[in-house]
Image (cartoon, grey):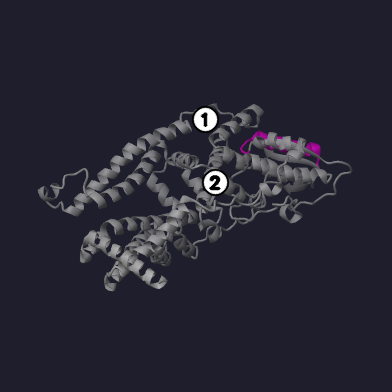
Amino acid sequence: MSDYGTSGVGSEESGATGSLSSDSETGARRPEPSDGDGSVELVGTAHVSSASVEEVEETIADRQPDIVAVELDEGRYRQMKGGTPDDLDASDLLHGNTVFQFLAYWMLSYVQTRLGERFDIEPGADMMAAVETAEAHDIGVALVDRDIQTTIQRFWQRLSTREKATMFGGLLAGMVGTLQAGLGIGLFLGTFLALGAELVAGPLLLSPGLADAVPFVGGSLLTLADGALLAGAVALVVGLPIAALLAYALDTDTEYEEFDIEELTDTDVVSAMMEEFRQFSPGGAEALIDERDAFIAHRLVALREAGYDVVAVVGAGHRAGIQSYLDDPERLPPMESITGTLKQKRFSLYKAFGYLFTVGFAVFFGLLLLGGAKEGWVIRLFVAWFLVNGIAALSLAKLAGAHWPSAIVGGGIAWLTSVNPLLAPGWFAGYVELRYIDVNIGDISRLNEIVSDEDATIGELYDRLTDVPLFRLIAIVAMTNVGSMIASYGFVFVVLPYMSAEVGGITGIVDLMLDGVENGARIVLDVIS
């Protein structure tokens, strides 16, 4: 498969129409095509194989083609040549599911980096060898791969929820181990479950009588201790099975010493690996392999039809698919079907829930006023919603390392974003934070170095990760959102019942809303009649 090292996330689609890369992109000359029909010779490589580097250099030197085509897009080529890493635009990183797409990209980069470390070769060395050898022989270079951002977006859109969970569970397990990953996921789920349970039902595991029987143990401390025990119990009950599933899925007992990296260029081995990946994720395989086979083949066919003799250096996993298209170009799908980003569904249950939640919030306050609730009480209720969301989101943003302006913006907008689940306060906090930190795709290399340190503790890993601007930005976004979620819990189950005492408790609120419905219906009928 392709080189997923530190490369052009955030760049725009280059050459989506199938146009050839220009001299300015490659820094190499564009020769005149040979007389007669052109030709394409594919060289299948493993991106972390020293033998592949030697094969590439020897093939180009022997064949002396007009063009050397490489499995790179413009962003990866530019960075491979030592250019400045692409900056990450806030609108790209913070909008919608792009954060999750970036995490998928990081996972692929991390896996390949670890392979490179194990076999002591820089990932993408085969492509670098192809470019450098072409330049040494004054041979033109063509960039024939699809833009990495487009590939990752289409890859993410085609993954099922189970596949996404397995991917990120695998990444987490690779960093901290399967047991720690499973318990960490379990503790995260347990914390939210315990928070809701304690707010609704009070102590579940500890006897309420302990608050009176044991000195210095008040009701609040008892609830906190009970919540911690409940979260720990859920972490064990949920986390241990998750750890076992991760261990089974990842097959952590595999002896890496028995793995020969040079076998990655063997046709049978590559076919078996591709088939295994396709069984895991048919949609993901289509985006990462099949579509890119067709995209690269479109570029190579265009070069061949222009009369160029081409040596194309591609990952061994793409060789068979590309060759089949070169042998029968009529099978190529239209270029527009494999370029651009996939559109999300216009309707989804999540979006429908978001809109209904927003309408419901407005209706709630409107019915209270129509039902005769005092304006002062309704205003205080709204202010409480604002403050609870704001304080929680601001506090967790600061805990993640946000600057004060970023935390204040995240906290200030939290009440509105909690009303509309389609928005998130973390996005706004992240936008402001980008005024203080410089984030670029080169941060991925630093992240890979840190998580590859197997001797570091989880605490040490987190401290070092937060020193990387890209990770800190993601942590700020996530923690701000978590703060708003916790606040929404607290408002519904703690603040609202407390403040409802002025109107007769929860029953009084229900009565006010019913009166509001009746009064509202009467107003509508009066208007109609």
Q: Residue furthest front?
A: 529
- Residue type of the residue flagged with mark 2: Trp
- Which quadrant would the C terminus be assigned to in this image? bottom left
Residue 137, quarter of the rendered image: top right
Depth check: give the residue in front, 374 or 31: 374
Residue 51 sits above or below residue 151 on the image: above
Left or right position of 151 against 464:
right
Q: Which mark is residue 98?
A: none
Image spot of residue 339 (x, y percent): 66, 49
Q: What residue sits 44% from the left and 51% below the top?
A: 464
Counting the numbered discs, the total is 2
- The reply to whether residue 358 is in sight is yes
Q: What is the secondary structure assignment of the residue under circle 2?
A: helix
Say which residue label 1 marks: 256
Residue segment shown in magenta: 47-65
Is residue 384 located in the magenta-colored stretch of the structure? Answer: no
Alpha-carbon neighbours of circle 2 within 10 Å: few (<14), some, or many (≥20)?
many
Q: Residues within 10 Å of mark 1 (few under 14, many from 20)?
A: few
**Quadrant position of the N terminus in the picture:** top right
State yes or no: residue 63 in magenta: yes
Front residue of 469/53: it is: 469
Could you tell whether 501 is left or right of 174 in the image?
Answer: left
Residue 41 locus on image (x, y percent):
77, 37
The residues tagged by marks 1 and 2 sit, at their Cα atoms, a distance apart of 28 Å
Q: Earlier in the sequence, mark 1 or mark 2?
A: 2
Residue 54 in sight: no
Using the image, determine if residue 203 lies above or below residue 247: below
Which residue is nearer to you in this view: 292 or 372? Answer: 372
For label 2, the residue is 156
Q: Amino acid at mark 1?
A: Tyr
